[in-house]
Image: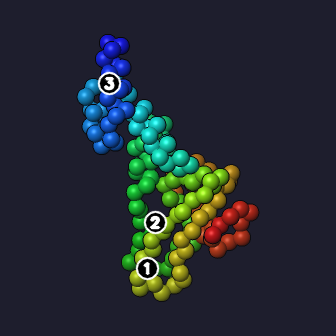
Amino acid sequence: VVTNLSTVCEVAYRLDMPSLLSFGKCDRSTHSIVTKIANERMRGLFAGLQPLAADSGRRPFWKNLVDALKPNILHFTYCGKIPDCTYLLNLVVDTAGCWFVEFEMTVTQNTKGLPCVGLVEACPSMSGKMQESGKFRQDLSRKKQDGLAV
């Protein structure tokens, strides 16, 4: 069995990510080896990014990160005023290094105020409930804050 596991590890390390994930469907032991390798790869490729997923302990890191990196609609309405709140993205960026962050914003038939896209520094006052909801009750970019809000 040890030879079999070492062979599985050797094969798994040589596969590209889509093939690796397909290979992980073989059996339970292969799946746990593949999950470990996929997590290592994603941590290496996306060093400094962490998913803001509430269930991060129950799902593999690589899966939470893939989901966090998908585009998402933060505010959508047919009519009404811009909400006085801040929506969080699904990931946390470690600002110790340099980053390039790209946003795309589409605004149509906007009559009351301008929506803002930017960065908000994580603060200790962010409760687990706020993280789960992904929303602050005020627009952090327009109110005076102790930390960075752009």
Q: Residues within 10 Å of mark 1 (few under 14, many from 20)?
A: few
Q: Where is residue 107 in the image (x, y as percent from the top left)?
A: 43, 79
Mark nearest the camera among 1 and 3 is 3
- Measured Cα–Cα span from mark 1 to mark 3: 50 Å
Q: Where is residue 8 in the image (x, y as percent from the top left)?
A: 32, 24
Q: Which amino acid does label 1 sit on?
A: Val
Q: Mark 2 points at which residue?
A: 74
Q: In which quarter of the image is residue 141?
A: bottom right
Q: Name the residue under label 3.
A: 8
Disc 2 or 1, which lies upstream in sequence?
A: 2
Label 1, secondary structure: give it. Answer: loop
Can residue 97 be seen in the rendering of this structure?
A: yes
- Measured Cα–Cα span from mark 2 to mark 1: 12 Å
Check the image and name the residue furthest to the right: 146
Q: Mark 1 points at which residue?
A: 107
- So how many labels did they put on this image? 3
The quarter of the image holding the N terminus is top left
